[in-house]
């Protein structure tokens, strides 16, 4: 698609983090003008398809597919389109830093005020975001209609009620062991499938320096913020190195877009201590089972990977649904209380790392959850729903 994802992330994090309202305003500024071209690409991709599986950015493909009579299936990495009283919209502010239900099972229901808060968070968040984006989205849909006649712009209410209450399945690609399916979803086409995990690449070989580092001492702590680029890679690296030193731990730093372990020109930082190893990229499925704990931004995919590895997880959320996953990890007892990026310091990161490594209860819960997630087949479950809806299999 004609969109620069890295530039989009950089604009979202131009002040270090982004509130939900800032997120939508910056999103409109970043991609609103490109929606005509993006929508045309999605419409063209829908032509000749047997089924269209769409994410929120793929909403143009959904509307073109409907005009073509092609079956559609929604695919979400977090709860934000389909409302529930059980937990809040994943972009919405989290009161008291908790999602408000039981740790290891569906053992308690939120109180009346919390249920109302949870349920109302979906229309409030979705409609606020949609009204900000609606002119640009409808502008794109008008272009899509030139490629696929019959593609309609949205009314003032938007697509949410049709998606939530319509006949098409909406698949939520996370595990019920992490976030149980709400009871009120049982009679609808809303499903929690389990995580969609990629197999480890067969032809991937770890760098020699990484293997030597792993073999040279006790299992290290993984630190990586993936595509999050809040600026100041050298400053963030210094903070992480100091935190590891305070915690008395070795660390593997994954550079990512944020440039951890690299200088302003993208070169490897010199003078890093021997207890730190910097790598540019490595499959999570290979690395995370070899470390003692993980520190990351709390993206849905990275959270899935660290939980599946059965290791305690320290989440440093930047924006979007990352605070939500951080709160859930803490609720489950498989990680410390999340540390928002704006509040991150060497001292509080060191405390969180020490807790993640030393707390045997947290370690035991992480291992048990990891075994549960490894036994699931989220991809297979998703395929069954897709085939049943699209092909009647």
Image (cartoon, grey):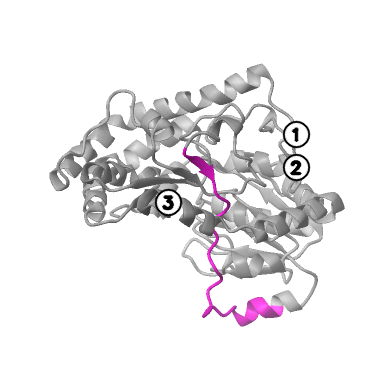
Query: Mark 3: few, some, or many residues within 10 Å (few <14, many ≥20)?
Result: few
**268 is higher (above) or lower (below) than 135:** below
Q: Residue sitting at 34 percent across and 37 percent down?
A: 28
Q: Is residue 197 above or below residue 320?
A: below
Q: Position of residue 239 (x, y in %)?
A: 67, 53
Is residue 339 visible from the viewing direction of this image? no
Q: Which residue is mark 2?
A: 104
Precedes in sequence: disc 2 or disc 3: 2
On whether residue 210 falls in the magenta region, the answer is: yes
The residues colored magenta run 189-212
Which quarter of the figure is the N terminus placed in? bottom left
**Left or right of 154 on screen, residue 345:** right
Task: State the residue position of label 3.
Answer: 388
Give the SS element for disc 2. Answer: loop
| Other-residue count near label 2 (Cα within 10 Å), few / some / many at <14 / 14–19 / ≥20 | some
Q: Are marks 1 and 3 in contact (CB under 8 Å)?
A: no
Seen from the viewer's position, the closer of residues 312 and 341 is: 312
The one nearer the camera, 270 or 185, is 185
Q: What residue is rendered at 66% in x and 17% in y?
A: 112
State the CA–CA distance, disc 1 to disc 3. 32 Å
Gap between marks 2 and 3 measured at Cα: 31 Å
Residue pictured at 63% horizontal, 57% vertical: 376
Whether residue 67 can be seen here: yes
Q: Main secondary structure of the magenta part?
A: loop
Q: Quadrant of the C terminus?
A: bottom left
Q: Residue 107: which disc? A: 1
């Amino acid at each position: 698609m004609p969109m620069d994802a890295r530039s989009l992330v950089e604009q979202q994090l131009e002040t270090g983090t982004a509130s939900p309202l800032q997120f939508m305003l910056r999103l409109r500024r970043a991609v609103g003008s490109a929606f005509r071209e993006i929508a045309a690409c999605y419409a063209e991709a829908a032509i000749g398809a047997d089924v269209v599986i769409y994410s929120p950015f793929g909403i143009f493909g959904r509307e073109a597919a409907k005009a073509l009579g092609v079956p559609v299936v929604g695919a979400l990495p977090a709860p934000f389109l389909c409302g529930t009283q059980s937990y809040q919209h994943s972009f919405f502010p989290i009161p008291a830093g908790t999602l408000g239900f039981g740790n290891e099972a569906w053992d308690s229901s939120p109180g009346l005020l919390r249920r109302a808060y949870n349920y109302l968070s979906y229309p409030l968040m979705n409609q606020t975001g949609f009204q900000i984006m609606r002119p640009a989205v409808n502008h794109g849909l008008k272009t899509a209609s030139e490629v696929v006649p019959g593609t309609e712009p949205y009314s003032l209410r938007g697509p949410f009620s049709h998606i939530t209450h319509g006949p098409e399945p909406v698949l939520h690609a996370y595990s019920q062991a992490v976030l149980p399916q709400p009871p009120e979803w049982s009679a609808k086409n809303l499903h929690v499938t389990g995580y969609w995990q990629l197999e480890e690449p067969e032809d991937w070989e770890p760098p020699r320096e990484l293997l030597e580092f792993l073999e040279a001492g006790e299992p290290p702590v993984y630190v990586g913020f993936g595509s999050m680029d809040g600026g100041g890679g050298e400053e963030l690296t210094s903070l992480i190195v100091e935190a590891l030193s305070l915690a008395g731990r070795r660390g593997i730093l994954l550079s990512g877009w944020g440039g951890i372990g690299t200088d302003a020109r993208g070169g490897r930082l010199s003078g890093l201590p021997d207890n730190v190893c910097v790598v540019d990229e490595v499959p999570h499925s290979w690395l995370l089972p070899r470390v003692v704990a993980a520190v990351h931004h709390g993206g849905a995919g990275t959270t899935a990977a660290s939980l599946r590895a059965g290791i305690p997880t320290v989440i440093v959320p930047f924006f979007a649904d990352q605070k939500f996953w951080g709160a859930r990890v803490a609720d489950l007892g498989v990680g410390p209380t999340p540390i928002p990026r704006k509040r991150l310091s060497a001292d509080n990161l060191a405390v969180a790392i020490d807790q993640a490594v030393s707390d045997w209860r947290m370690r035991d819960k992480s291992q048990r959850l990891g075994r549960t997630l490894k036994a699931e087949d989220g991809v297979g479950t998703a395929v069954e729903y897709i085939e049943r809806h699209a092909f009647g299999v």
